[in-house]
Image (cartoon, rainbow, N blue to C red):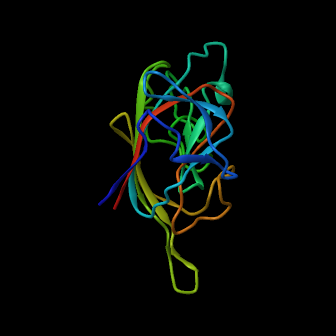
């Protein structure tokens, strides 16, 4: 196992925009970064991995639904794990925080209030392909949010929209989404498995 630190609070050098130009997110004095212009993609790619991401929702009391602290963590650049302020929502939704966007609803709402740091720990098994490039097994993922299991060994049969690629891939990057909201991120790493 190797640990790849993608963001330690000091530099954006491990990320670029999707087009390969330098990332333009905001580095903060507290060791976090705030979503800036355009989604960013890790230079490092991975297959099977444990991915750790910490984020903080902005306080947006007047906003609702998809307008309230929206961002996303794209596993392999093609499966969106939704980042959203869903604190206090009684029933988890397929487009709420912790969802695999419009594919899988989280088992529980594990959200903390805005302005508190939250974590995703993602155990990802990459899709498998044969020598002809045909997928033989779809990707699988188990996800913990703030220490609670929100997805348990689910099968990802397809990609979600808005990522780096429109099809599942055997090896891919981590993408963090710009959805126009000032979500903060910190302490992002990948442990290859």
140 w.r.t. 31: above or below: below
Q: Return the residue found at the far top.
A: 61
61 w.r.t. 93: above or below: above
Quarter the N terminus occupies: bottom left
Q: Residue at x 66, y 30 (%)?
A: 66
- Number of numbered discs on residues: 0
Q: Decide which of 87, 8 is in the foreground and name it.
A: 8
87 w.r.t. 160: above or below: above
Q: Decide which of 123, 18 is in the foreground and name it.
A: 18
Q: Position of residue 132 (x, y in %)?
A: 58, 86
Q: Residue at x 50, y 24 (%)?
A: 28
Left or right: where does residue 152 sit relative to residue 180?
left
Q: Position of residue 193 (x, y in %)?
A: 34, 62
Q: Position of residue 98 (x, y in %)?
A: 50, 39
Image-quadrant location for residue 108: top left
Q: Position of residue 65 (x, y in %)?
A: 65, 27
Left or right: where does residue 168 sit relative to residue 107?
right
Q: Return the residue found at the far left.
A: 1
Q: Residue at x 59, y 65 (%)?
A: 168
Q: Residue at x 55, y 46 (%)?
A: 15
């Amino acid at each position: 196992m190797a640990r790849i630190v993608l963001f330690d609070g000091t530099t954006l050098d491990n990320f670029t925009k999707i087009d390969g130009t330098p990332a333009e997110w905001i580095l903060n004095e507290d060791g976090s970064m705030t979503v800036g212009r355009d989604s960013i993609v890790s230079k490092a790619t991975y297959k099977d991995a444990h991915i750790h991401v910490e984020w903080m929702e902005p306080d947006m009391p007047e906003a609702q639904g998809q307008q309230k602290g929206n961002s996303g963590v794209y596993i392999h650049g093609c499966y969106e794990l939704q980042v959203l302020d869903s604190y206090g929502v009684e029933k988890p939704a397929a487009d709420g925080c912790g969802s695999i966007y419009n594919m899988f609803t989280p088992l529980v709402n594990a959200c903390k209030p805005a302005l508190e740091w939250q974590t995703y720990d993602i155990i990802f098994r990459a899709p498998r392909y044969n020598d002809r490039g045909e997928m033989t097994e779809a990707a699988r993922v188990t996800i913990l949010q703030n220490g609670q299991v929100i997805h348990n060994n689910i099968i990802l049969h397809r990609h979600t929209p808005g990522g780096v690629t429109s099809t599942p891939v055997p090896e891919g990057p981590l993408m963090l989404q710009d959805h126009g909201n000032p979500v903060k991120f910190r302490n992002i790493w990948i442990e290859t498995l």
